[in-house]
């Protein structure tokens, strides 16, 4: 029986992509060529995963899987020290760390959409207010036209 490489116990949060879906996971132990991952849902045996933590991207294949954990074999040698450093750095920082290579554009689009909708709403209410003011002015002018004409004739 082949001796297995020593495992290093860790508890590192990561993001895992299996197919088109992303999920949160926790790396429980690792060696230079493998990891024990706890995730929901657990990927099936033979699936390929993309595991992201900090600046590291690890591609791996699921070797075994049960209800909540799976063992993966990585495509390349993984630096446990680098993963631990990235994890420690993000745990110490007070601000949330962006895990993506590029920030998600959805938030930017959402803010732009909210600004546009507020501008449209303001314009609609401004036009409606101007229309009501014009209508009220013409109505008051018609109501006061007859008495003012009588005053003008009496004075003139």
Image: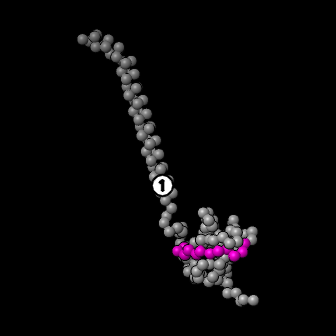
- Which residue is rendered at x = 45% and y = 52% of the image? 112
Of 133 and 71, nearer the camera is 71
Residue 61 sits in quarter = bottom right
Question: Is residue 47 toward the left or the right of residue 144 in the image?
Answer: right
- Residue 103 visible to the viewer: yes
Q: Position of residue 4 (x, y in %)?
A: 70, 87
Q: Can residue 87 be seen in this view?
A: no
User: Residue 74 at what x, y percent from top left?
Assistant: 62, 78
Magenta segment: does it hold 60? yes
Position of the N terminus, as image quadrant, is bottom right
Q: Which quarter of the rendering shows the C terminus?
A: top left
Q: Which residue is situated farthest in the left direction here?
A: 156
Secondary element under disc 1, as helix, strand or loop, is helix
| Above/below status of 106 relative to 32 | above
Q: How many marks?
A: 1
Examine the structure image and report whether residue 92 is included in the region drawn in magenta: no
| Residue shown at 48% from the left, 54% from the top | 109
> Majority secondary structure of the magenta segment?
strand
* Residue at numbered disc 1: 109
Region in magenta:
54-65
In the drawing, does residue 130 fall left or right of residue 19? left
Front-most of 155 and 116? 116
Query: Residue 46: where, in percent of width, then height?
Result: 68, 72
Label 1 crowding class (10 Å Cα cut-off): few <14, some 14-19, many 20+?
few
Front-lying residue, 149 or 73: 73
Pick the front one: 15 or 119: 15
Q: Is residue 136 above or below residue 50?
A: above
In the displayed structure, 140 sits above or below 25; it is: above
Q: Where is residue 54 in the image (x, y as percent from the top left)?
A: 54, 73
> What residue sits 43% from the left and 45% below the top?
119
Q: Residue furthest front?
A: 46
């Amino acid at each position: 029986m082949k001796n297995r490489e020593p495992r290093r116990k860790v508890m590192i949060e990561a993001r895992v992509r299996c197919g088109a879906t992303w999920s949160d996971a926790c790396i429980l132990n690792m060696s230079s060529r493998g990891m024990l991952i706890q995730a929901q849902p657990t990927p099936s045996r033979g699936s390929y995963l993309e595991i992201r933590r900090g600046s590291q991207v690890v591609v791996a294949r699921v070797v075994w899987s049960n209800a909540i954990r799976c063992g993966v074999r990585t495509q390349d040698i993984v630096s446990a020290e680098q993963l631990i450093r990235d994890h420690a750095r993000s745990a110490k920082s007070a601000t949330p760390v962006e895990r993506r290579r590029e920030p998600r554009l959805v938030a930017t689009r959402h803010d732009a959409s909210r600004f546009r909708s507020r501008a449209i709403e303001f314009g609609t209410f401004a036009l409606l207010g101007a229309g009501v003011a014009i209508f009220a002015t013409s109505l008051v002018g018609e109501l006061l036209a007859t008495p003012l004409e009588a005053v003008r004739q009496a004075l003139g």
